[in-house]
Amino acid sequence: MANDTTLDTIVPELLTTAEAARLVNVGERTLWRWSRCGIAPRPVKIGTGKTGAVRYRRDEYLEWIRAGCPRVDGRAGR
């Protein structure tokens, strides 16, 4: 059986800041601010120091969107 997986069909589970921002149609700085302020899901840090990477969980963001983008910190308001 042939493997039909190509780079075009791979959907990453962890998104870069640019990819996550495109997913919710906002700028990267807006997404970063939202995640820091408890409006959107927080990213995960992979590695440490300057060599670390910040990624956003795709499934977490898709669920957040399906739920109507509620604040993740539980506070009322926008």
Image: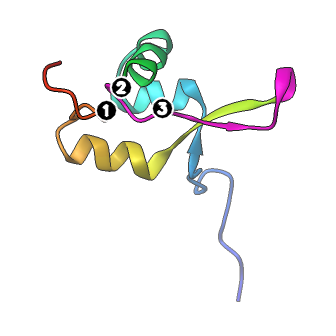
Q: How many marks?
A: 3
| Residue 7 place in picture, x, y as percent | 68, 52
Helix, strand or loop at disc 2?
loop
Helix, strand or loop at disc 1?
loop
Residue underneath mark 2: 38
Closer to us: 66 or 52 = 52
Q: For the residue marked with disc 2, what is the amino acid?
A: Gly
| Residue 51 place in picture, x, y as percent | 86, 27
Residue underneath mark 1: 73
Q: For the residue marked with disc 1, what is the amino acid?
A: Asp
Magenta stretch: includes residue 66 = no
The part of the chain drawn in magenta is 38-51
| Residue 31 place in picture, x, y as percent | 43, 19
On the rendered structure, is 70 left or right of 46?
left
| Residue at left offset 60%, top offset 32% | 16
| Residue at left offset 31%, top offset 50% | 63
Q: How busy is the neighbourhood of tag 2: few (under 14 within 10 Å), some, or many (20 plus)? A: some
Q: Is there CB contact under 8 Å for labels 2 and 1?
A: yes
Q: For the residue marked with disc 3, what is the amino acid?
A: Ala
Q: Earlier in the sequence, mark 2 or mark 1?
A: 2
Magenta stretch: includes residue 42 = yes
Residue underneath mark 3: 20
Q: How busy is the neighbourhood of tag 3: few (under 14 within 10 Å), some, or many (20 plus)? A: many
Q: Is residue 1 above or below residue 36?
A: below
Q: Earlier in the sequence, mark 1 or mark 3?
A: 3
| Residue at left offset 43%, top offset 52% | 59
